[in-house]
Amino acid sequence: MIDSHGLRRNFLDYFTRLGHEEVPSASLVPGDDPTLLFTNAGMNQFKGVFLGQERRPAARVADVQKCLRVSGKHNDLEEVGGDEHHHTFFEMLGNWSFNDYYKAEAIEFAWNYLTKELSLNKERLWPTVYEQDEETFALWPKVTGISPSKVLKFGAKDNFWEMGEVGPCGPCTEINYDRGPNYGPDYPKSAPNDPHHHRWIEIWNLVFIQYSREADGALTELSERFVDTGMGFERLLALLQGVGGNYRTDLFVPILNHLEALIHGHETIESDPMAFRAISDHVRTLTFGISDGVMPANEGRGYVLRRILRRAARYGRKLGLEEPFLYRLCGDVVGTMGLDYPEIREAAAHVTAVVRAEEESFGVTLDRGLALFHKEKERVQRGGKRVFPADVVFKLYDTFGFPPDLTLLMAQEEGLGVDMAGFERLMEARRKDSRRTVTSTVSYAGPPWRGPEGERRNVFVGYERLRAATKILQIEPEETLPRGEEGWILLAETPFYPEGGGQVYDRGWIEGSGVRARVLEAARKKPGSVVVKVHVESGTLEAGSEVEAVVDKERRLKVQAHHTGTHLLHAALRKILGSHVRQAGSLVAPDRLRFDFNHYQPVTRSELLNIQETVNRWVDGDLPVEVAADVPLEEARQAGAMAFFGEKYGDKVRVVKVPGVGMVLCGGTHMNRTSRVGLMWIYSENGIAAGVRRIEAVCGRGLRERAVALDGRIDRMSRILGGPKDEVEARVEKLTERVRMLEEER
Ligand code: SER
């Protein structure tokens, strides 16, 4: 019987034989795509290719992509556990044609794979097509010999696939498998897409991408034609293993067995399939999500993981598990899938520690929250009502950390609804309240660039030079920009570093004959261009004119010292605290650096001094900082370069190496020797979330400025206290003592 590893290989080998290049799964965290929280389909990583913004890796490719469907247009969370074939995390087998083969070959390849390579019974396969796609309707019988009566037509809801609210899309044809009369009676023709019929399961979706859905809802025709297919890996595996459900395949059985053992057999998958399936699903999501760099948090991706973890923890309580247990099951996920996903092997200890810390922290409030829920539920039921009140949902959320979807789920289990609208109103009131008290943080808003993309790339020369004689290619919003105005410009060559990898953008000037503009900001604009925001101080900037672009050197050097310092700090943390330390966030600014990393206890004062000393010894060592551009990604990884979570790397990467210290994939700018970092002072260390610590430090010139400012403060203090500077502490002590005595006398 084929196992999960064997099936992944079999699929990839089949398509390799048909001339496809095998590409690795992209991260679950989509690189640089604000429209998407998590990778939800194999095609996500090729979105730029479909839209003509990125180079295709090959004309035909195939892969096995890890996906999460927990938010946005594709969200299966509520379905999970209720049947054998829904998941939050799943794998998608896919093959793609980038303007190479099209409909006929896509159908032929898929049909042959299922019926010849895997020997599935032809009679059981039922394709569906988009009702307006007569071409595909006619191709099925022609290519495969199937009877036209077995090709069913459906509307856009089922057979027009879209990635999200915006993005590439097109008509699709799906292949459904009829599992036979044991799974349900004979059916009407709507059965394959009817959620109440579990006899037919959709296994493969072939999408013919030819449009892009725009923000205003319009469909734009793409200039090329693409094939994007996605097959449900777990479903196919279940069919081939003949086990009657995804949760009975070798992907899940070890997790479920371990869970049963932890409960000591009181409950089994047969007695509470919902809880067993949901827990085993959720630990896979947690293992892969955290391995790809997401940390449980109160917003964004991190909140999705936190919600999933808390749902799973509550199911655990239902099964009688009083102690943290999910972290133990993460090891089974690594055991079943680590062979094909080295990232979960590498992150295993980290995942376990994060999940455990999260379970422990939720465990503190879980029982009290459950008690509140039960009390309230009984009150509602006694009163003959059917709706759980909003203020209790809010209290459960606010005081006990119950995500509202968890309360909803618990209420539904009791046959109750939840006043979600009321909860949203309470949340809105809370948000308004906190806006009043918290100073808002400035967030980066991209340039309003609407110019033609594709041809108008520019060249970034800011690694080598801080000045460039160049030309203005384009100006937004108008072709000219007069004195006093602000706008965005695209230069043919740009020395300005855009924000990226934690490093802040450059500032500087644009100078030309009779014109001078201040550069306020530089931003990356797809595809591969950097645009700058300017404020014109004199004259008028004109598209097409020759100018001199000048980076503010002093500011850039301060930033660079902090960037090189960040790499040294990261290496020192791993050396002193252990190799589980991974970067979880970073800011590289002119006046400081901020570095977030995973570690499960506060860093002690002596560890901190040790870390600082290690960095400063490397600084004193005057080691070279070597940069190699265009290194093949695989080569860099093999050489041991550290890659960062959530970053999307091309096939060629830039490697920054300090011999004897470490090697990191990094696109930022650096000092050429460690001595130019100057000196590092770590001035703060604290926890920002379960398992995440934050260090703030300052280097080089920034440190000089800080030292001068600090000295000034001591100076002022000594004047207030009336005495020499080196007596400040003694005088403060005396003063405190005197205040204490006076208070006692009173
Ligand atoms: N994009 C399609 C899907 O996700 C086929 O890969 O179903």
Image: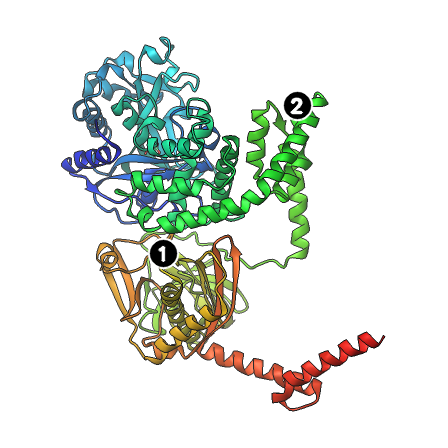
- Observer able to see residue 232: no
Q: Which residue is mark 2?
A: 386
Depth check, front residue: 680 or 220: 680
Ligand 1: which quarter?
top left
Callout 2: SS? loop
| Image quadrant where residue 327 sits | top left
| Residue nearest the observer in this picture, 602 or 671 | 602
Q: What separation in Å lies between label 2 and label 1 (alpha carbons)?
A: 48 Å
Q: Which mark is residue 644?
A: 1
Q: Secondary structure at mark 1?
A: loop
How many residues crowd around disc 2 within 10 Å: few (fewer than 14), some, or many (20 or more)? some
Q: Amino acid at mark 2?
A: Arg
Using the image, determine if residue 692 lies above or below residue 166.
below
Circles 2 and 1, Cβ within 8 Å, touching? The answer is: no
Q: Work out which quarter of the rendered image holds the N terminus and state it.
A: top left
* Residue at 51% in and 49% down: 297
Horizontal and vertical percent for residue 309? 48, 40
Q: Is residue 337 above or below residue 269?
A: below
Looking at the picture, tell me which residue is in the foreground, 712 or 613.
Answer: 613
Amino acid at the residue labelled 1: Phe
Residue drawn at the location 66% of the way across and 46% of the way down: 430
Q: Quadrant of the C terminus?
A: bottom right
Q: Residue furthest front?
A: 264
User: Residue 75 at x, y = what percent?
Assistant: 45, 34
Q: Nearer the viewer, residue 7 or 299?
A: 7
Q: Which residue occupies the extreme right position in the image? A: 746
Horizontal relation, residue 505 to residue 240: left or right: right
Give me the residue at 30% from left, 40% from top.
335
